[in-house]
Image: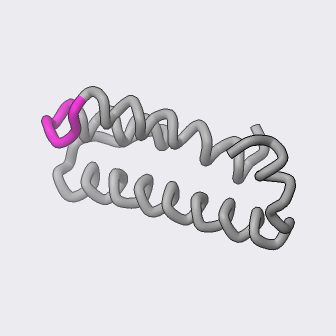
Amino acid sequence: MGASSIESISQTKQDSILLNLERACQASIDLAMRIVRIKRLGIPTESGEAFYLVKQAGLLTDSIHKEMVAMVGFHNSAVHDY
């Protein structure tokens, strides 16, 4: 999608897309936190650490772990504006 394609999408549709991405990110974070708790993998101090603990337990590959940590960065930027 080029810049002109993005500009042609209504603000409402853009907001809807962003909201659904935020929800998907949060669901992934919640799942990682739940796995950490159920498996007693530790006490993460931030979302990215939960994915690290799940990876250390052998439940995530290195590449998926990197993607999840990047997703946390996107989530923080989209939700918390940093």
Instruction: Tell me which residue sits at (84%, 47%) in the image.
Output: 4
23 vs 38, nearest the viewer:
23
The answer to whether residue 74 is left or right of residue 9 is left
**Residue 23 in the image: above or below residue 70:** below
In the image, what residue occupies the spot 22% across and 39% down? 60
Residue 43 is situated, as x and y percent measured from the top left of the image, at 35, 42
Whole-percent x, y for residue 78 in the image? 71, 49
Residue positioned 27% across, 55% down in the render: 37
Identity of the residue drawn at 34% across and 59% down: 31
Q: Is residue 58 magenta?
A: yes
Q: Above or below — where is 65 with respect to 26?
A: above
Residue 8's place in the image compared with 69, above or below, is: below
Quadrant for the C terminus in the image: top right
| Magenta residues, start to end | 56-61
Q: How many marks?
A: 0
Q: Nearer the viewer, residue 5 or 26?
A: 5
